[in-house]
Amino acid sequence: MYGLKKEWEIEAPARECTLEDYVGAEARWCPGCGDHAVLSTVQRLARDLQLPPEKTVVVSGIGCSSRFPHYMKTYGFHGLHGRALPVAEGVRSRRPDLDIFVVTGDGDCCAIGAGHWIHGIRYNMDLTILLLDNNVYGLTKNQTSPTSRVGEKSNTQPHGSFFAPLNPISVVLGIANASFVAQTVDWNPPHLYATIRAAHEHKGASFVRVLQRCPHFSSHVFAPVQEDFSQMLLMESERGVKLAEPIRGMFPRTLEHDPRDLSKARELADRTDVYPIGVFYKNDNASRYDTVTQQGLEITRAEKMAAINGMLDRFAVQGRN
Ligand code: SF4
């Protein structure tokens, strides 16, 4: 592969990775913030799957949740607001051998990053995308986000959010070539783990919306759901997420849902009486753009230079004799 094994890649010695091998800087999120739960879940998943830390990358944009790469002892890129996906796609284009997680928030992904979000899903490159949705801009101290509910007061809309919130799951299910769409909650670790694991196993752009507690600015939003599990609908499937007892028994409402059924997935996503959690949709046959961008990675430096020079020569201006 050009630029990798042949020229400068160093093989790490075989070893057993422990949790400490994935734990980076001390997380500086507020106490009780749901981001802590997602971080420890990704660290446990990396340990369980023995992902080589030197071959794991976490890419983020801007926001509270986007501090995620600092707290993983892997490679990371804390990027520009809304631009996590194009950065991750660039990494994926040149490095098919890496495990790539994208961590974004509702402001980062669904507002300034919305264009990249739509086309990132459509291009379906192999990425595990985690949307940590707390319905508010937390880092910049309480502003209305695209997922804030009508009437939620903030510094930018002190009389309450004016528009109906955007539903990230419905949006993604409406994008052509979406291949994996799921929803989970940060306060149920087994479901959170099982969902992120299923997303990581899927080959393509796996989109997971995590309903995330923000005790500092929006604790009231998900508090009723944390206390009353009947406000969630556990979608189950062998093709999606299946919880073992006794965790499954915590959910009074369950539904067998085949994630190949896109119409049903859209119907479930639009429900407002309950939060469906699990895998809405999964398509293993969607086209992946990274299968295109990986072409030519095997060529040598000399072959690449010859190709570039050949292309430049086409535009050479010939002098008169
Ligand atoms: Fe978490 Fe909210 Fe604090 Fe940000 S402001 S770290 S989202 S609790």
Image (cartoon, rainbow, N blue to C red):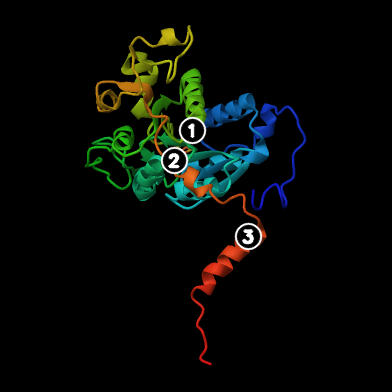
Amino acid type assigned to the residue bearing label 2 in the image: Arg
Q: Residues within 10 Å of mark 2 (few under 14, many from 20)?
A: some
In the image, the residue with mark 3 has its CB under 8 Å from the nearest atom of ligand 1:
no
Q: Residue 230, labelled with which disc?
A: none
Q: In this image, 18 relative to 155: left or right?
A: right
Q: In this image, 55 relative to 111: left or right?
A: right
Q: In this image, 53 relative to 201: left or right?
A: right
- Depth check: give the residue in front, 225 or 207: 207
Q: CA distance from mark 1 to mark 3?
A: 30 Å
State the image quarter where residue 54 is shown.
top right
SS assignment at label 3: helix
Amino acid type assigned to the residue bearing label 1 in the image: Lys
Query: Residue at 40% of width from left, 44% of height from top?
Result: 123
Q: Residues within 10 Å of mark 1 (few under 14, many from 20)?
A: some
Name the residue carrying label 2.
288
In the image, the residue with mark 2 has its CB under 8 Å from the nearest atom of ligand 1:
no
Q: Residue 252 placed where, x, y %?
A: 35, 9
- Depth check: give the residue in front, 33 or 182: 182
